[in-house]
Image (cartoon, rainbow, N blue to C red):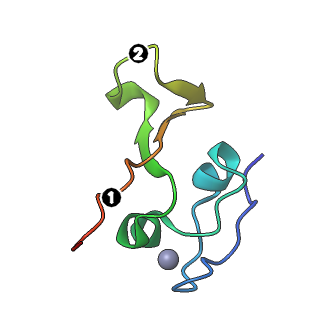
């Protein structure tokens, strides 16, 4: 169902509906998500460009790759 979108809570850019469709819990756009490093790392690619893999899910004509970022090692100490 297209048209479901909302602004990113950080930069107010509209989050692509495909991203929300795949990750309803997200509050950030892809860019901010990667910048803050706190959310999932997402890769959204058109299906015809993506290889089929066991770790990927297909949503309509998009392939969403979703994986958790590794926790960062603590600095200092
Ligand atoms: Zn953003």
Residue found at the very far left of the displayed protein: 76
Answer with left or right where residue 10 lies relative to residue 74.
right
Q: Secondary structure at mark 1?
A: loop
Return the mark for residue 72: 1
Q: Please report the residue visible at 58 percent of the width from the left and 67 percent of the height from the top.
A: 15
Observer-nearest of 27 and 59: 27
What whole-number distance in Å separates the C-alpha atoms at marks 1 and 2?
30 Å
Residue 77 percent across, percent down from the top left:
24, 72
Q: Please report the residue visible at 55 percent of the width from the left and 25 percent of the height from the top.
A: 57
Mark nearest the camera among 1 and 2 is 1
In the rendered view of the protein, which quadrant contains the N terminus? top right
Return the mark for residue 4: none
Answer with left or right where residue 2 lies relative to residue 19.
right
Q: Which residue is mark 2?
A: 52
Tag 2: Cα neighbours inside 10 Å, few (<14), some, or many (≥20)? few
Q: Is residue 61 above or below residue 32?
A: above
């Amino acid at each position: 169902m297209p048209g479901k979108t909302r602004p990113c809570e950080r930069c107010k850019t509209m989050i692509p509906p495909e991203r929300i469709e795949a990750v309803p819990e997200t509050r950030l756009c892809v860019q901010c998500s990667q910048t803050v490093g706190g959310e999932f790392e997402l890769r959204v690619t058109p299906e015809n460009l993506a290889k089929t893999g066991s770790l990927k899910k297909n949503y309509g004509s998009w392939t969403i790759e979703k994986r958790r970022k590794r926790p960062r090692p603590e600095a200092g100490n």
